[in-house]
Image: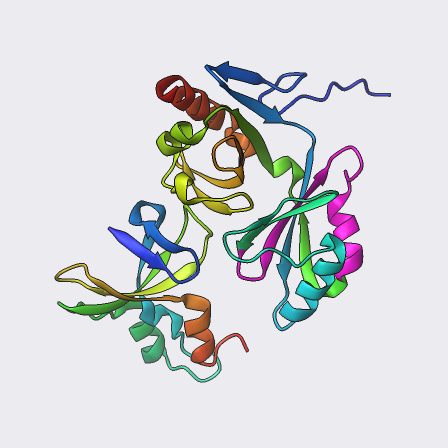
Amino acid sequence: MIINHPILGPRDSAEFTYLGDAAMIDRPDPDTASPQDWHDYAYLRDNPAGTHRELWWHEGGDRSWLVITRNTLTHEISKVEIARDVARKMGRSK
Amino acid sequence: MHSLTPITALGGTAPRVDQVAGVTCTEITDLALASVAARLGKEKACAKALKAVLKAAPPDAGKALLAQPFSAVWMGPDQWMIGADFATHEDLAEQVKATLKDAASVTEQTDAWCGFDLAGDDVRPVMELLCNVNIRAMTGGDATRTSIHHLGCFVICGDPQSFIRILGPRASAGSLHHAITTAMASAL
């Protein structure tokens, strides 16, 4: 499987490690979150048969975190983004 | 006074040199390293100050600046590894920090890495066995980080056919050296 790194171009998937659902970027605000929010954030994940956004780490490469949109049925990768850019678009790390 | 004997990454008193056919693998012992990471919101100031240090624009993604006295390799967005001659720049991190000030975090890296220079008639078959990098698509001044023998290594291309520099984790210098010499013996 080839992952088309947005900066470095196509790289072998063996260079990457998988973390999980990209929803982890969207951490609840510690000042306002309820215990239920934390429970949902820590334990609840969707398990879609189809398009899934997930976090991958380019461990054997430039060590960037990526948000990869992958079809869990076909393994087709439709989008690869730098996780930093995704998080900033969501208003994080400003 | 202590009487200490400096040793190389492979534990010798002189750089290790291995030769197979027309290719030599030489341990690098004279390289000082420091990493530069721009601080949040100061990316432009960092790039500008780094340009003053390097006397050239910091390298873009997948590129290296092969120059004297300072060389540089792109590591990630707004991150670079700076290299210089150890004899004159043992305190490289301090020297770079003096110019970059609070625009970047500068970290001493000299003893975190070991390095090997592959040079000779044709190093490409060796690199093809060692890693995923498409060595035949590289040109002089290209640099990338990849896995060699399960170790995260920098591959810096001086000339894709005749000169490649590999930087890898110093604690695994023996394993990296083993991987390189094994590949040389197989490919050449």
Q: Is residue B164 left or right of residue B188?
A: right
Q: Quick check: B6 above or below B99?
A: above
Assess whether residue B79 is covered by the magenta stretch.
yes
Q: Quick check: B119 above or below A63?
A: above
* Residue A29 appears in view: no
Which colouring convention does the figure follow?
A: rainbow
Q: Residue at x 57, y 22 (%)?
A: B10
**Residue B23, x across and y down, in percent:** 49, 21
Write down the region rendered in magenta: B76-100
Q: Is residue B171 left or right of residue A8?
A: right
**In the depicted view, which residue is nearer to us: B185 or A35?**
B185
**Residue B17, x across and y down, in percent:** 57, 17
**Residue B25, x across and y down, in percent:** 53, 23
Assess whether residue A65 is covered by the magenta stretch.
no
Q: Residue at x 71, y 46 (%)?
A: B70
Q: Quick check: B174 above or below B89?
A: above
Q: Residue at x 81, y 17 (%)?
A: B3
Residue lying at the far right in this picture: please name it. B1
Q: Is residue A65 left or right of residue B18?
A: left
**In the depicted view, which residue is nearer to us: B24 or A53?**
B24
